């Protein structure tokens, strides 16, 4: 099993089997885990949740939906101005989601994809030692002002959604052998909000707003499961959602004397490396669990190909930083 390359999750191929056959052999020597490609509805990342989960929920009102094209309904937005918008119905203090462990679809898809993974491993197409990877958006990347424009609604929806994600994780852990499993949290709004895109909602700019649910959900994952984090600014239709601002020379220096971490990198330091180091890696490192942090940004010349960035935070023992290869045909973050 290799540790120097990561497939973030989404792969523009037609089926789970095609994804795993294509990359399971060619890249297996470099991969700690292989995803199922997030095929089908999950290819739209969080957008599918708008029409599959939120639209029609008894406690939510749909106040905007993607505009039709030639009289035909559209489920996926064509721009950020075309996304679904929701608000909590008057009198509802907390939105909750039924059918725990299956409502969001992550556990169901994971079980189906793991069957393909296990079959291909038994045939020798995927070598032993490579884990099965399931990637899930973190709570605040789903329940965010882009979809819930009333800031007061965020606190009414997020706790229930966190419960729903926790139930999905529990179902995954109960279905898939933990020694075969890698779980990755996708954090896009968590990074971009702290970077300055949430100035009109002060609480969203605070690190603590975002790392608290990350910590709670991560504590439910046994040490034997490989835990990973994908920090990015998100994309929409392949275009970067935020123009990165470099975090300055201090983010590349060691507090003990200004020593740079790692070799120079032409892509520059990650704009919110301090957030990642102080807000996520350091608290989780106290548990001394195994894990990995995947810090990526959109490559300026290769569209959806994302490369690793140069700044290497001081990570707790047991954590590693991986190079990132992201292949995405459609994404919204």
Image (cartoon, rainbow, N blue to C red):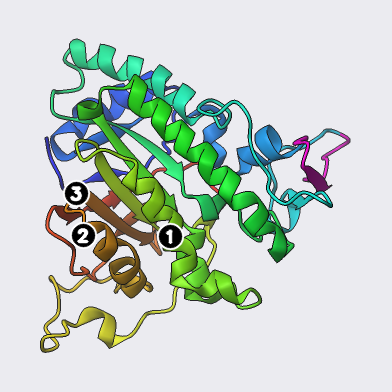
Q: Residue furthest bottom?
A: 257
* Inter-mark Cα distance, 1 to 3: 17 Å
Instruction: Give percent across and percent down for residue 34.
Output: 28, 33
Residue beneath the point at 50% across and 27% down? 101
Instruction: Give percent across and percent down for residue 44.
Output: 56, 40
Point out which mark residue 111 bears: none
Point out which mark residue 289 bears: 3
* Mark 2 surroundings within 10 Å by alpha-carbon count, few (fewer than 14), some (14 through 19), many (20 or more): few
Residue 109 lies left or right of residue 225; in this view the side is right
* Inter-mark Cα distance, 2 to 3: 8 Å
Magenta stretch, overall SS: loop
Residue 238 visible (yes or no): no
Magenta segment: 56-71
Residue 91 visible (yes or no): yes
Residue beneath the point at 55% across and 29% down? 100
Residue beneath the point at 37% across and 55% down? 215
The kind of secondary structure element at disc 3 is: loop
* Inter-mark Cα distance, 2 to 1: 15 Å
* Mark 1 surroundings within 10 Å by alpha-carbon count, few (fewer than 14), some (14 through 19), many (20 or more): few
Instruction: Give percent across and percent down for residue 62.
Output: 81, 45
* Residue 94 sits inside the magenta stretch: no
Instruction: Give percent across and percent down for residue 259.
Output: 11, 83
* Residue 63 sits inside the magenta stretch: yes
Q: Quadrant of the N terminus?
A: top left
Residue 227 lies left or right of residue 17; in this view the side is left
Residue beneath the point at 52% across and 69% down? 193
Residue 119 lies left or right of residue 83; in this view the side is left
42 and 213: which one is in front? Answer: 213
Point out which mark residue 286 bears: 2
The kind of secondary structure element at disc 2 is: loop
Q: Which residue is mark 1?
A: 212
């Amino acid at each position: 099993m290799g540790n120097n390359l990561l497939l973030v999750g989404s792969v523009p191929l037609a089926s789970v089997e095609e994804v795993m056959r294509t990359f399971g052999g060619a890249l297996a020597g470099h991969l700690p885990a292989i995803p199922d490609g997030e095929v089908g509805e999950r290819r739209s990342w969080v957008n599918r949740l708008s029409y599959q989960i939120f639209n029609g929920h008894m406690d939510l009102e749909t106040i905007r939906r993607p505009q039709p094209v030639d009289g035909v309904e559209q489920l996926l937005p064509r721009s950020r101005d075309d996304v679904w918008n929701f608000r909590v119905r008057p009198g509802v203090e907390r939105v909750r989601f039924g059918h725990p462990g299956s409502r969001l679809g992550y556990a169901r898809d994971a079980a189906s994809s793991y069957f393909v993974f296990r079959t291909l491993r038994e045939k020798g197409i995927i070598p032993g030692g490579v884990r099965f990877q399931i990637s899930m958006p973190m709570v605040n990347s789903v329940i965010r002002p882009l979809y819930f424009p009333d800031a007061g609604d965020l606190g009414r929806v997020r706790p229930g959604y966190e419960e729903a994600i926790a139930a999905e994780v529990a179902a995954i852990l109960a279905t898939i052998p933990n020694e075969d499993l890698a779980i990755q949290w996708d954090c896009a709004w968590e990074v971009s909000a702290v970077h300055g895109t949430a100035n009109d909602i002060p609480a969203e700019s605070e690190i603590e707003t975002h790392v608290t649910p990350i910590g709670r959900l991560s504590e439910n994952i046994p040490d034997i499961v490989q835990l990973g984090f994908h920090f990015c600014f998100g994309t929409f239709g392949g275009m970067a959602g935020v123009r990165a601002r470099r975090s300055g020379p201090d983010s590349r220096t060691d507090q003990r004397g200004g020593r740079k971490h790692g070799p120079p990198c032409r892509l520059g330091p990650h704009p919110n490396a301090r957030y990642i180091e102080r807000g996520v890696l350091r608290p989780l490192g106290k548990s001394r669990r195994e894990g990995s942090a995947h810090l990526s940004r959109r490559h300026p010349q290769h569209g959806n190909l994302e490369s690793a960035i140069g700044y290497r935070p001081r990570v707790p023992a047991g954590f590693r930083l991986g190079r990132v290869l992201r292949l995405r045909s459609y994404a919204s973050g």
